[in-house]
Image (cartoon, rainbow, N blue to C red):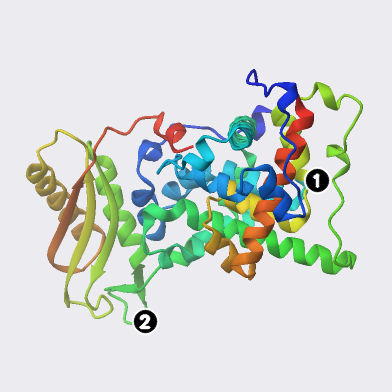
């Protein structure tokens, strides 16, 4: 195991602002980019796993996202907004995966089934609230889960979600309201 | 988790499909309105919400959901941070530095058939390197202004610098400018008319916990 561990020397850049790191990375500084990868990679991984419903493709999606980010950093006007910019990229890549997957399996307009690992089991009542939340999130219909994740993890506005998913604002509002109500109702079972 | 709604006041009043029934159970409001109200920090105060026991129960449920969401995220982030580092290496290995090479800057050579160049990206790297060897500052964006492809054409350089608190900014800037001139002279044949340094000062000293705070 230690052989796979990269030597983690605390970079002097670890405390630099997002703006500084983005500017340097846009100028071609790989070390600054590495700090950004470490700072936001974990959140991007969590995000991709939530949207995809499993972590099989998370590594690929996050890697593709960072490669795209590296190539396009020069187009980012405001370096202090790099977090939401990265979340937008990983969101697009995740959604592309979902579309490709759906095309591949030729699933019709049905909701994705809950992954096996999240299926309710006999010990459900012993779960903590957070485990229960993770389970319920995974069983939300795909379009609701996407909206919820964009809202809660990527901190998108309703309008941004509508743009991103190419949906009317009213639909986004409806999906979010439904997701929220489902989660609230399920919470009644948690205690 | 300890904050339980009394069992006789279980909140199940809203209806998933019927807005009218949802409103009937929530004193005329919807879950969405209550969620927005919570997002606004419950200001300006709305007595029709604040004075309704049904709404109060729903708001508590929403707050509990929000806390669970945050706890779940914290837990996931903690788990991710314990992963081995190979994913970072794998990302960096797949990145090509050419993406930011920029323009080519010619270098002279005694042989008429040889063509030597240094890339703009490499020159920016030299400038950052100069800054990284100094204490108490970070060099940010470096821009080469002018036609660098024609030897002998005077150019200027614009550099963004962040200076740590409590430093003598004019002195640091002058030291940096001098060190940059020296390095440019050593590695390039650029005729540099000016190095314009824009300084912003950092509000607080960076430290290793800053990364955590970002999360």
Q: Nearer the viewer, mark 1 or mark 2?
A: 1
Q: Taking the image as drawn, is residue A85 in sight?
A: yes
* Rendered-image quadrant of the C terminus of chain A: top right
**Residue drawn 38% across and 70% down?**
B102
| Circle 1 crowding by C-alpha within 10 Å: few under 14, some 14–19, many from 20 | many
Q: Residue A171 location in percent, x, y?
A: 66, 65
Q: Taking the image as drawn, is residue A153 in sight?
A: no
Answer with the quarter of the image where residue A107 lies.
bottom right
**Residue drawn 83% across and 69% down?**
A103
**Residue drawn 58% across and 33% down?**
B56
Q: Nearer the viewer, residue A187 or A128?
A: A187
**Residue A105 appears left or right of B46:** right
CB atoms of marks 1 and 2 within 8 Å? no
Q: Is residue B17 above or below residue B117?
A: above
Q: Nearer the viewer, residue B52 or B84?
A: B52
**Residue B131 appears left or right of B214:** left
Q: Residue A47 location in percent, x, y?
A: 64, 47
Answer with the quarter of the image where residue B78 lies.
top right
| Residue at the disc numbered 2 | B113
| Residue at the disc numbered 1 | A139
Q: Chain of mark 1?
A: A
Q: Secondary structure at mark 2?
A: loop
| Circle 2 crowding by C-alpha within 10 Å: few under 14, some 14–19, many from 20 | few
Both marks 1 and 2 on one chain: no
Q: Secondary structure at mark 1?
A: helix
**Residue drawn 42% across and 48% down?**
A32
């Amino acid at each position: 195991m230690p052989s796979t561990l990269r030597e983690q020397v605390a970079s002097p850049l670890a405390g630099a602002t997002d703006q500084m790191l983005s500017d340097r990375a846009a100028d071609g500084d790989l070390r600054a980019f590495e700090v950004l990868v470490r700072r936001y990679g974990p959140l991007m991984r969590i995000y991709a796993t939530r949207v995809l419903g499993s972590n099989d493709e998370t590594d690929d999606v996050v890697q593709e996202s960072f490669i795209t980010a590296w190539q396009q950093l020069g187009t980012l006007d405001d370096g202090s907004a790099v977090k939401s910019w990265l979340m937008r990229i990983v969101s697009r890549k995740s959604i592309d995966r979902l579309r490709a997957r759906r095309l591949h399996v030729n699933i019709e307009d049905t909701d994705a089934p809950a992954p096996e690992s999240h299926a309710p089991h006999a010990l459900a009542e012993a779960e903590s609230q957070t485990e229960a939340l993770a389970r319920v999130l995974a069983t939300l219909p795909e379009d609701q889960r996407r909206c919820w994740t964009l809202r809660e993890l990527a901190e998108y506005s309703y309008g941004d979600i509508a743009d991103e998913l190419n949906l009317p604002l009213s639909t986004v509002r409806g999906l979010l309201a439904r997701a929220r109500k489902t989660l609230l109702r399920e919470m009644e079972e948690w205690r | 988790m300890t904050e339980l709604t009394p069992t006789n006041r279980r909140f199940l009043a809203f209806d998933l499909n019927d807005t009218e029934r949802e409103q009937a159970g929530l004193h005329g409001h919807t879950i969405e309105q209550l969620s927005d109200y919570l997002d606004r920090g419950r200001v300006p105060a709305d007595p029709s919400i604040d004075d309704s026991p049904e709404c109060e129960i729903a708001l508590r449920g929403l707050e509990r959901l929000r806390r669970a969401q945050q706890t779940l995220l914290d837990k996931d982030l903690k788990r991710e941070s314990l992963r081995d580092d190979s994913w970072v290496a794998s990302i960096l290995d797949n990145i090509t530095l050419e993406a930011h090479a920029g323009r080519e800057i010619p270098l002279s050579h005694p042989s008429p058939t040889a063509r030597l160049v240094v890339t703009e990206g490499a020159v920016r790297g030299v400038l950052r390197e100069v800054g990284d060897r100094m204490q108490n500052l970070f060099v940010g964006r470096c821009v080469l202004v002018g036609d660098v492809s024609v030897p002998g054409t005077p150019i200027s350089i614009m550099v963004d610098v962040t200076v740590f608190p409590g430093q003598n900014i004019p002195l640091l800037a002058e030291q940096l400018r001098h060190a940059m001139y020296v390095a440019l002279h050593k590695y390039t044949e650029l005729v540099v008319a000016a190095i314009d340094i824009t300084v912003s000062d950092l509000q607080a000293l960076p430290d290793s916990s800053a990364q955590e705070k970002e999360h």
